[in-house]
Image: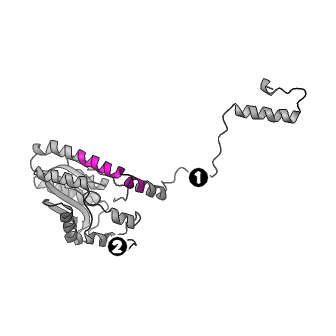
Amino acid sequence: MPSLCRRPASMPVAFALAVCLSACAAGRPAAPTASPFVSVATQPANVGDARTAALAYRNSGAYDRDVAEIAAQAGRWLAGRAAGVARPALVLDIDETALSNWEIILRDDFGRPIVGPCDPAGKGPCGWAAWDQLGRDPAIGPTLALFRQARAAEVAVFFITGRPETQRAATERNLAAAGYRGYARLAMVPDGAHFTSAADFKAPVRAAIEGEGYTIVANVGDQPSDLEGGHAQRAFLLPNPFYRVP
């Protein structure tokens, strides 16, 4: 027995053992506590945790700062490249790139139902198609500043969106009200057309713009599918942890 646990002859054995065990425990790290449950490491991230994180990201101001940072990088790139190419162009997505849908994202609790009515005065969920027809999305400020920078430099701006043609009038009205005036063209998905990925629609539209003699200096979107497929000198991905468009 170690010296710190030696028992004086007058000390009862049981008491001496208790003192010894206590002293030994105090002199070494505690044993790791076993997990109270059994689980697996292969499950995906918890949806509830992701919702909480996305809400905190938006409400903390971090989202706005990150959007501003990417838009500023696009602006610096545009300023350095546009004058050196023939017929420079900027391509912008609309939803969560040029216009913000935060109001309906909150109302739908991060869901994205496409069909269904939308009562602006109500508190229930909204169908996104009906919401788009209201034309009330505000501009995303850093993107609007980029748009105005491009127009001041005589860079043609093209909008390419996954919204269908049935929403053209409402979308054009919304863009104008938000401050996007003087763009070259708005490309929308033909009614009834379906694409496995947004890239399958958007990349050929960019190729057609190039076919008209433009050089797409920058392509800006919030989804990887907005940017995939090439046909731009550089692509800029704005943050969007709120929904995914394949």
Figure check: 47 above or below 82: below
Residue 148: x %, y % from top left = 16, 53
Q: Which circle marks residue 39 in the picture?
A: 1
For the magenta stretch, what is the residue range?
55-73
Cα distance in 3D space between marks 1 and 2: 38 Å
- Name which residue lies at 28% across and 49% down: 68
When asked about the image quadrant of residue 117, the answer is bottom left
Question: Which amino acid lies under the numbered mark 2 shown in the image of this protein?
Answer: Val
Would you say 112 lies left or right of 91 here? right
Figure check: 68 above or below 160: above
When asked about the image quadrant of residue 242, the answer is bottom left
When asked about the image quadrant of residue 29, the answer is top right
- Name which residue lies at 24% across and 46% down: 72
- Residue of label 2: 115
For marks 1 and 2 on the same chain, the one whose residue lies earlier in the sequence: 1
For the view shown, which residue lies furthest in the right direction? 10
Q: Is residue 59 a member of the stretch shown in magenta? A: yes
* Residue toward you, 195 or 125: 125
* Residue toward you, 187 or 154: 154
